[in-house]
Amino acid sequence: MHELGIAFHIADSVVKIAEENGAKKVHKVSLEVGEVSTIIPDYLIDVWNWNCKRVPLLNGCELEVETIHAITFCDNCKQTYDTVPQGKICPHCGSDRTWLQTGNEVNIKDITIE
């Protein structure tokens, strides 16, 4: 379960940002998670909630997870397509010269502080 390490890393980053901005409390963190990032949002939220109880600045902080759609680009025909239903092989030309354009990232989108 790599979500635990990810939740700790995000919490550390959020605390650092909040402290740099003189926050007394963090109420909500909005996170963007790629569709093929292998992160399971429900697990991430569970460990986030557990970890926030241990960090006074984050106690009670809500984690909102938004999904970033996975899109793949084909170097052969220069078209994009939905990654999840198609995989690595381009549905337009059959090439395997493809790469993931979006959908594997994890970004802190927004932090709501007091």
Image (cartoon, rainbow, N blue to C red):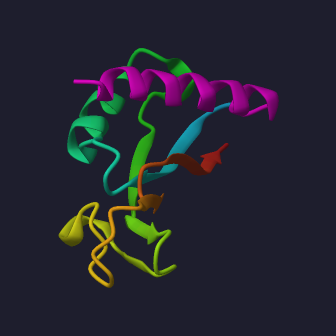
Q: Residue at x 41, y 44 (%)?
A: 62
The residue most toward the top is 54
Residue 3 on the magenta span: yes
The residue most toward the right is 21
Q: As drawn, is 58 to the left or to the right of 5?
A: right
Looking at the image, residue 80 lies above or below residue 63 = below
User: What is the x, y in percent for residue 23?
Assistant: 72, 34
Looking at the image, residue 24 lies above or below residue 38 = above
Q: Residue at x 40, y 28 (%)?
A: 7
Looking at the image, residue 25 lies above or below residue 65 = above
User: What is the x, y in percent for residue 17?
Assistant: 71, 32
Residue 52 visible, this angle: no
User: What is the x, y in percent for residue 111?
Assistant: 61, 47
Q: Residue at x 37, y 21 (%)?
A: 51
Residue 53 visible, this angle: yes
Residue 6 on the magenta span: yes
| Quarter in which the C terminus is drawn | top right
Span of residues in magenta: 1-23
| Residue 26 location, quadrant | top right
| Residue 43 location, quadrant | top left
* Viewer-side residue, 104 vs 40: 104
* Viewer-side residue, 64 vs 89: 89
Q: Residue at x 49, y 18 (%)?
A: 55
| Quarter in which the N terminus is drawn | top left
User: What is the x, y in percent for residue 65?
Assistant: 38, 53
Q: As drawn, is 59 to the left or to the right of 43?
A: right
Question: Magenta-highlighted stretch: main secondary structure?
Answer: helix
